[in-house]
Amino acid sequence: DPDPTNERRQVDAAYSSVTPTPVKDPELILLSEELLKTLGMDESFAKTPEFVSVLSGNAVIDTSEPWAMCYGGHQFGNWAGQLGDGRAIALAEILTEKGDHYELQLKGAGETPYSRRADGRAVLRSSIREFLCSEFMHALGVPTTRALSLVVTGDDVYRDMFYDGRIKAEKGAIVCRVAPSFMRFGSFQLPFSRGKLEDVRELVDYCIEHDFPEIDSEDAAKYMLWMQEVVKRTAELVATWQSIGFVHGVLNTDNMSPLGVTIDYGPFGFLESYKPEYSPNLNDNNLRYAYGNQPYIVKWNLYALSVAIDPLANPNDVLTPDGEPKLSEAMESVLNSYDAIYDRKYMEIMSRKLGLTSLPQRETTGDEAGTSETESLLGSLLTLLRESQVDFTLFFRRLGTLDPRVEYSRVEELPESLRRLLEMSEREDGDGLEKELLENRWMEWFAWYAGTVREQLPDIKRAEKKLAEKEDGAEKASREHPYASWRRRMWRTNPRIILRNYVAQQAIGDAETGNFSTLSRLYESLKRPFQLSVEEESLLGVSSEEGVKASDALRDPDAEFVEPAPEWARTTAGIAQLS
């Protein structure tokens, strides 16, 4: 952008040079020490006033020229034209000793040419949520942008949280986000919409050179190879989201990365009970971005991207009846590969969530005489979870407390933590017969599942031994319990803890009064989502030293953040749903 003025305007460029707006009294309240090391930064520097000055936007690195990106996007399915970084300013790009590169971006650092009617600032509540979820998703192994720091600015920011005219002052904050690139699908869509195909080509070439070095083709075929990889990474990403119950909340094309990483944590949420229709976005009236719709919406977003990329490799001027560019057969084939990639990844993860190596099916009697139907172990479970409204995360974690050798006939006979979970489900009780039928179906499923575990145990042990040799060079001891391998397989896949909105709100409420202790404890817990509880250690038959090597003070540190949301939190605006 040749125009140096920081004024709202249409920009015919990929980015604009912008200087962050200084804040009054910056204070560092959260820091990812692990990410600091990844970036090759000295821990002693993080304790200096200069560090805080840079990460609050009060100082600029001498050798850098901060910038804000220009991009467009489809929002709720409608083309919105130019959008861009309205409150995010990139500070610099870091090249580590290992050869990795990362952009440092301040969210909430002030106005840019893309701020439109906004002030370029961010409030503490949304900044806390972004920092925590970024680092939690990383701890889960989900591809994501990272968060290096959270700084409170000492300035008030005025917001109408529910868009109902009730504006109030809130504490301002800035998150330093980190990723190899903050390009979005909309980065390519905007120049395409303006007829600037050579700009699209230049952006894709840049993206391939910096973030897809495995693509070494120099002709037009590289654009199809790039699109294939974008489809693959994105399909696997959303499959991972579905497996942990993560709901992004605002899957516009300007909120999706070609790198296949989770980006832009706004009104996100995690499933409490299994409700495919759950959307955490207060403005998502048609449930476009609900949990159950995410795989389909993401594929639609990939289609929107492919429209901009297809002409680079397959030039044609054919239009659909709607006046949209018609995709080439080659691009259609790439786009349609999404379904198989998604299904394969999703089934792979869900198998591991159940501690299995494969998911069985069986023939059952159909509704009509003489007919049969195919029933899957996973499909039957998801139906039961939905009807019973059992907590999604805790069910998979506590399923590992079962003993597959035991034939359970009643819910009362199940291990205590699992039994309590089924009994405390939020489902309204029906009549006695309905409850009995549902319980019988649960017992039938548990019997099928336990039989599957027994049958697959040799394969499970081989898979875990192979993984242990890859990770540690030796198999972890499993001699104490014959089903320890199965339990480890489950517990390294299913987190004990998720970032529940009501828990985040408790930490936010305390932080807004200047008390950051709850926030600090929550952050520490989210960094170790797979840590074994005391009960789980005993079921594996290992001591603390052989298991998590935790001190007595840390034997069960996450208890205050683990439990499902209380009833009041399930319907409270600003907790159950956010804007």
Image (spheres, rainbow, N blue to C red):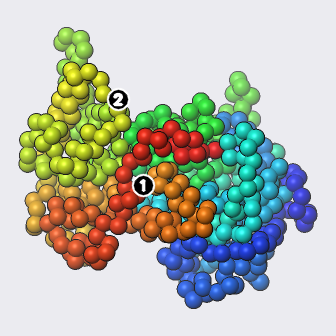
> In the rendered image, which quarter is residue 217 located in?
bottom right
Q: In this view, does 249 lie above or below 463?
A: above
Q: Which of the two discs, 1 and 2, sits closer to the camera?
A: 2
Horizontally, residue 342 falls left or right of residue 446, namely right
- Label ID, residue 498: 1
Q: Callout 2: few (<14), some (14-19), or many (20+) C-alpha neighbours within 10 Å?
A: few
Residue at (30%, 28%) from the top-left corner? 429
Q: In which quarter of the image is the N terminus?
A: bottom right
Q: Where is residue 419, by image quadrant?
A: top left
The residue lying toward the viewer, choosing from 522 and 385, is 522
In the rendered structure, the answer to whether residue 263 lies left or right of residue 403 reads right
What's under tag 1, amino acid-wise?
Ile
Disc marking residue 428? 2
Residue 338 in sight? no
- Residue 285 visible from this viewpoint: yes
Q: Above or below — where is 206 with respect to 26?
A: above
* Element on which disc 1 rests: loop
Relative image position of residue 362 (x, y in whole percent)? 20, 31
- Residue type, numbered disc 2: Glu
Q: Residue at x 70, y 23 (%)?
A: 321
